[in-house]
Image (cartoon, grey):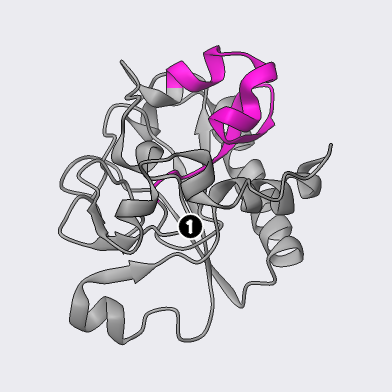
Amino acid sequence: MTHDPSANDPGTRDPQAAEHLGQHVRDARSDQAGVGTDDLQRLWAPWRFGYVAGDDPIEGCPFCVLPARGPDRDRESLILHRGEHAFVIFNAYPYNPGHLMVVPYVHEAELEELDGEVANEVFELGRRSVAVLKEQVRCAGINLGMNLGTAGGAGITEHLHLHVVPRWGGDTNFISVIGASRVLPKALEELYDQVAPGFG
């Protein structure tokens, strides 16, 4: 694969992006471990603005629609790995760079209703995701868990998923506390290429 030097230039890839660089983008659809849908904002400068703003929204459950696109579109869909019963995908609205989710293919909201074999693979892929993140992004720690139900902080309540969030010392800093904002320094495309080899 050849590298396009303009690939990380939002103004080149999306002519409308340049005027939005550095702006706050409120994410009303976020689903983050321990945060849920709230007023936390992100500085999305590295991303293509149109994608972040949701110019091409997914109709239906994204955890059903994205894998149904087929393996040929996995990079576009941010799917890093497909197992027999579950898959690993980047969170497009991450709490931290490298925020992964392990999702069963079956559309199920209740953990206790999940078939045992499926649940086993979800947690095995969670274990594998922890190892991959430690190796590929050199994180200092990891949050691993599920937000079940609206009261539990889930943004997508109808299809359960396991969050795997890399952490670094100082990643919850003054800009999160004072400004209700979070700076995400790496584009998803760049992170995909960095993390995907770990699942190879």
Query: Regarding mark 1 in the picture, which secondary structure is present there?
Result: loop
The quadrant in which residue 124 appears is: top right
Residue 91 lies, with reference to residue 159, above or below; the image says: below
Q: Is residue 122 left or right of residue 27?
A: right
Q: Is residue 25 left or right of residue 104?
A: left
Q: Nearer the viewer, residue 153 or 191?
A: 191
Q: Does the stretch in magenta take in 86?
A: yes
Q: Tell me where residue 104 appears, x and y as whole percent.
A: 52, 27
Q: Nearer the viewer, residue 21 or 65?
A: 21
- Amino acid type at circle 1 is Pro
Q: How many marks?
A: 1
Label 1: few (<14), some (14–19) or many (≥20) C-alpha neighbours in 10 Å: some
Q: Does the stretch in magenta take in 58?
A: no
Residue 114 lies, with reference to residue 97, above or below; the image says: above
Q: Tell me where residue 189 appears, x and y as whole percent.
A: 61, 45
Q: Which quarter of the rendering shows the C terminus?
A: top right
Judging by the rendered image, the residue that carries numbered circle 1 is 46
Residue at 65% across, 42% down: 125
Residue at 55% across, 49% down: 188
The quadrant in which residue 160 appears is: top left
Residue 164 lies, with reference to residue 138, above or below; the image says: above
Q: Which quarter of the rendering shows the N terminus?
A: top right
Q: Is residue 128 left or right of residue 39?
A: right
Q: Which residues are magenta?
A: 64-93
Residue at 72% across, 54% down: 194
Q: Tell me where residue 5 appears, x and y as whole percent.
A: 71, 50
Q: Tell me where residue 25 appears, x and y as whole percent.
A: 25, 53
